[in-house]
Image: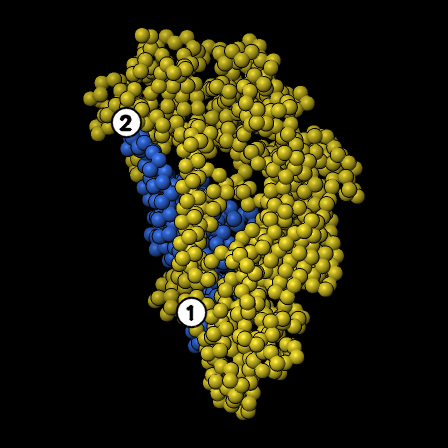
Amino acid sequence: MFSSRISRGPQRNAGSSRLMAVPTTSDRVAHALDFEAYALARGRDLQRLAWSLCLDAHLAEDLAQTVLVKVYREWDRVRAARDREAYVYRILLNAWHDQTRRRSHAERATDADTLAALDRRTTDDPADRAVERLELVRHLAGLPERQRAVLVLRHVEGLADDDIAAVLDVRVGTVRSAASRATATLSRLLREESS
Amino acid sequence: MSPTEFDPRHGGSDDEVGAHVRAVADLAPLRDPRDLLGAVLAQVEQQGPVRRAAVREHPRRAGLLLSVAAAVVALVTGAALLVGGLGTAPPPAGPTLPDGYVTVGDGLALRLPDGWVDRPVDCGGRRSVFTLAGQDAAACDADAAGPSLTVTTRAEASETSGRMAPTYLLGSRRRVADPVCARGGSGACTIVAALPDHDLVLRFAWRGAPGASGASGSGWGRADVEAVLSTLRPVVLPDAAPRDAVVGSTWRLDEVSSQSFPRGSVVGGGTTSVWDGCQRWGVAYAVDSTAPVRLRSDERSVPGCRQQVDLPDVGAVSRVSVNGDEMLWWGSGGVVARLVRHVWPLGAMSDDPGPGPLVDVGSHLEIQPPLGWSARPVTCGARTVYTLGPATSATCGPTSGSPTLEVLDPGIVDLDRTRWPTEPVGALQVRRSRPSCEDGHDGDLGTCTVWAAVDGHPEVVAYTYTRSDGFWRSEGSAQKAAAIFRTFRPAGPAGVPGSTTNAFERLAPDADRALVAQRSWYLVEARDRAVPVHADNAGVVDLMGDELLVLAGCSGATYAYRPGAARPLRELLVLRDEPGCPEAPRAGSVRRVTADEREMRWYGAAGRLLARFAAATGDAATDPAVDVTSTPLGDGVGVELPTGWTTDLTRCGDGRRDHVVACDPTGDVRLRAFSSGDADDVEPWLRRDLADRDRTRARDGLHVRVRLADCTLSLPGTCTSPALVEGPGDGHRLVVEVVWTSPDAPGWDDADVRALLRTLHVVPA
């Protein structure tokens, strides 16, 4: 896991342009409606990303909601951020980190039991293959969380290593190293799976 | 390779790993974004306004914001009603489930075909069987009769049926396979359905003709299975008990179905979570939610856990009611569990010697652990630790053996207390988390922690206990924590919370307000530790209105302390938490302040000296006698420019000359000022944005609120520190802004901004 929360907050565009903005009643309404549009547009992506990180349906649902609540509360900053999505990624990763830190080790979500109970399918039935993928979740879940975050941001969100480094507040070399180790681990597991 | 083409058996390269990851992402269970948005806005509304400052200073505006949020919730809910259809609709006002529907578990119900038996037979474990009417009763042997539906959990299905082949998946993979029929005779045909997001396996079985691929001799086939599956819908809890009635109390599971169970199964938390007595999660039913019932599975193989509680089948609860001290969980066939309200007063615990001394929690709160707790707590960084046991004082080390009660500085606590259930304690609303347990090391079973907080107060109190002594005592420990947290009570002078009288006068009767206000003070001692005095304004105490500000000397205010404020939560700021910064008393812990010409003392509960300050002398930065070269900024306010600065704007860079009044020798650091009409444009925004942020005091009674170092990401980026300057009274008002580029002006930072702003003064007319 990360050694700590990503501490350096996203930098904002500030200065005279924002100074001259005068919030009005209509601004407030626009604030809510603007956020609504964002949430509706990005809601599925955020849920998908949350799931990819925590690999637990219930926790992912909580995580996505938590992130959007935080985004709502910081909407002015999010909207003003130079890279809005990077800002949201950071919120998401910090929330995930908090969620992981607080979660009891004794608490296990249903999915884990579900996955453990599933047998491997050997047929070409598409449904079976879907179930098969569920098993693959375990491989991803077995990665250290930073490695998992790197893989998810790279392959699900399609971020470049530089962008991932900015989101995680680490060096690019750290991102590449984590990605390399994660790829090696997953490749090995997949080879073992196929053997 | 697209996710749908991914074949995990190949393993391999980065591309394949990427396909793997995307394939996993593709399995994400997705809520309708409208539902998600509705939940978000509802949570925002429940938590209160977005900006607390707006509430206090602009109640109308904040009210409008809430109205907008509520309106959006209503819009979204309405849209969901119109578009979402059956699966997302709120609960009907009538019966628990529509006619013909039965709960099948994990928050789902389906409609049985006409004539089917709607009261399943308990076949042990977590299995339910529904069969076609005409038979005397549903049979546990699903293959023995005509069409039947067996509902099990995945784990159960795996144990009893061995390898299964789920062929039906909801969502984007909706499909129903052909039935699998026994060969060589009129054997049984079977279709097994699995739902990726639910812990359910549905097994349809009927007798079929040899070789039949669908329709069979019994007239039952794939189309019938598909028709039944199409009726699956979430279970809603239309008659759920009032949330407060459930989560505000502790409940013990008294009976499940026809079995009796030992004590120790309790209900608590934001959902009616049931512990099975082994510190494991059982099932969780959302009390006040129309969302499908959630499940967190429990582990049964816990060392020392001898008691097994078979909770109602997951999703079997469709309604919860509370009648006095009894909570009933209802399923489709009647009551499936009964729980009784459990009262566990502090004095009733067998090993509790009775109430002990009051513990100062801060912000005018006290709690009262039992006798035997350490009378001399220790300060461990931002924690104040009390322990139980023979030790005369607590230690800062890891918890070992004894319970530990910690008062946590809210500035370092990042816990979402809004999700903790609320329990009224007197006039207070106490929030208490569910126990969170951590695995230990070297055979130690670890510790559990229960957090608690009081609405309107910033502090969080943590009760940590070991769970190495087995379940029952650990479970009792959780109850003891709850009992202790029920002793929360207001502290300090009567009527302090919510009082509208001047806070400083109320809290510092022995101090001369003017005496304190006219001086700057250095923190020289806090609690039992000496605080070094730094040269750069370390530990300066400043007075801003009713607030005592303690500046850490670490390039920012560490604590903004409003003594006696009714709602101190938003008065505390922790901007820096760096080693070496002096520690000031926690917000709200100061009960009395005394001061003379040289020394100011802050006292806490029981007259304990919390901090001592020395009057500053000879500090030019805080000396009110200003004799400097003044550069006018407008509106009767001037500033003392640092050495080398110039007002020759031709040397102040380019592109940002609007309202620039001065810059440093390099031109990279620029001071801008908006006065009069210009300030009218930005002042409302600044006032709102900075209300609870950083404050400092300039000269001649001028107040300054500044937002420190707001920088862009670009390199070199632009850093901006806008500040609102006002006072005394309505005499002056303007906005000043320090702008610099980074890293081109690497020597400039927040401390410089503050130092510059402190030189603001009134220019004689």
Q: Is residue B147 visible?
A: yes
Give the x, y percent position of residue B579: 51, 31
Q: Which quarter of the rendering shows the N terminus of chain B?
A: bottom left
Say which quarter of the image contains residue B293: bottom right
Q: Residues within 10 Å of mark 2 (few under 14, many from 20)?
A: many
Task: Give the residue number, with chain letter if any, for mark 2.
Answer: B668
- Parent chain of label 2: B
Q: Which chain is yellow?
A: B
Q: Is residue B746 visible?
A: no
Q: Nearer the viewer, residue A189 or B672?
A: B672
Query: What mark, if any, has residue B173 been given in the picture?
Result: 1
For mark 2, give the secondary structure.
loop
Label 1 crowd bin: few (<14), some (14–19), many (20+), radius 10 Å: few
The chain letter under disc 1 is: B
Q: Position of residue B89 (x, y in %)?
A: 47, 58
* Residue at x 72% of width, y 45% of height: B343
Q: Rounded to the nearest whole Å, what is the CA distance between mark 1 and mark 2?
A: 60 Å
* Amino acid tagged 1: Arg
Above or below, comparing residue A181 to residue A24 in the picture = below
- Res B429 quadrant in image: top right
Residue B444 located left or right of residue B235: right
Q: Residue furthest left?
A: B650
Give the chain letter for blue: A
Q: Which residue: 53% across, 86% down?
A: B218
Q: Are marks 1 and 2 on the same chain?
A: yes
Secondary structure beneath disc 1?
A: helix
Where's residue B53, x and y in %?
Answer: 45, 31
Numbered badge on residue B41: none
